Image (cartoon, rainbow, N blue to C red):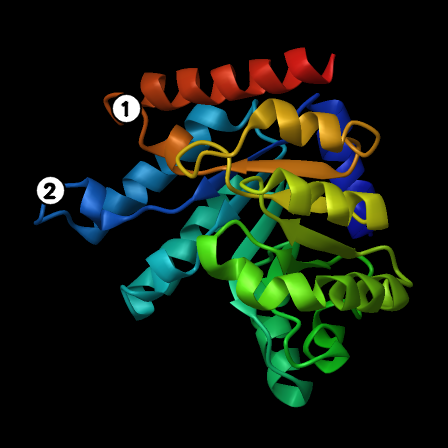
Amino acid sequence: MLSFIDKLKTNISDKNSNLCVGIDIDKKYFNDNVSLDEMMDYSMMVVDATSDLAAAYKPNLAFFEEWGSKGYYWLENLMKHIGNDHVVIADAKRGDIGNTGLHYANAFFNHFNCDAITVSPYMGEESIEPFISTPSKGAYVLCRTSNKSSTFIQEDIYSKVISLCEALNNQQNIGLVVGATNDDALMDVRNSTDLPFLIPGIGAQGGDLQSVLKINEKNMDTTLINVSRGIIFSGNKDHDSIRNSAKQYLNQLRGLNG
């Protein structure tokens, strides 16, 4: 079975794309009486509109879990629709330890067939280990995130997160979540490690794509740039609007990455 790092590099190289499309299907962008079936259809349309442009997809679990068991049914069907030709990252931000972590890993890797999951390292190495035991599956560990208040905690501990992840990365299946909204923080992390990056914060959150690419120019073979709302809710929220927005971001990525 293909290792996680090989699948990541292959998707980026073969598709000539570092684009990760975040699937955050928030019902507030629709009519008040929007149905689950309509939301499901919309998420499938996002995939259809971007499948030849994106290297990866990142479904955010919050927007599925709020629908209860029907939301998990939706995620199951979305995963089948995406198939195996993209890297799929469950944006679940799990971080429990021991047996509980193993069950989370079993759910996302074996039931939903995700390739990777976002993980909180706050409880130490035991909160990461359950998600990295299989070389074909990976974990993106929260390091320097894109939200405004992140610095309060992360500025003092992010170097420890990097050291921990490098020490645990025996199977080359750990990456870091590093936001695009703080260029100095992004540069500090990149200067400290060559681990793969998942970079949110481009688009609606205001991160500068040119700065992100310049900082990561030597590591683009393993870097994913996530765009969610800037693609999936663009224009008239139809197939063509979504596709055109994804194309624009991808063309910027390719142009700036030269």
Using the image as rendered, state which of residue 11 and residue 27 is in the foreground: 27
- Using the rendered image of the protein, determine whether residue 54 is visible from the camera's viewpoint: yes
Q: Which residue occupies 36% across, 40% down?
A: 43
Using the image as rendered, state which of residue 24 and residue 159 is in the foreground: 159
- Using the rendered image of the protein, determine whether residue 193 is visible from the camera's viewpoint: no
Specify whether 245 is left or right of 58: left
- Measuring from the top left, give residue 120's x and y in whole percent: 61, 69
Q: Which mark is residue 217?
A: none
Specify whether 150 is left or right of 217: left
Identify residue type, mark 1: Asp
SS at mark 1? loop
Note whether 32 is above or below 159 in the view shown: above
Residue tagged by mark 1?
238
SS at mark 2? loop
Q: Which residue occupies 51% across, 63% down?
A: 92
**Sequence-wise first label, 1 or 2:** 2
Specify whether 25 is left or right of 127: left
The image shows a total of numbered marks equal to: 2
Q: Which mark is residue 31?
A: 2
- Measuring from the top left, give residue 32's x and y in whole percent: 9, 48
- Quarter of the image for residue 169 reads bottom right
Identify residue type, mark 2: Asn
The C terminus, quarter of image: top right
Outermost residue toward the left?
33
- Quarter of the image for residue 237 reads top left
The span from disc 1 to disc 2 (Cα, nearest Å) is 15 Å
- Quarter of the image for residue 103 reads bottom right
Note whether 167 is above or below 39 in the view shown: below
Q: Are marks 1 and 2 in contact (CB under 8 Å)?
A: no
Label 1 Cα crowd, 10 Å radius (few <14 / some 14-19 / many 20+): some
Q: Which residue occupies 63% across, 80% down?
A: 101
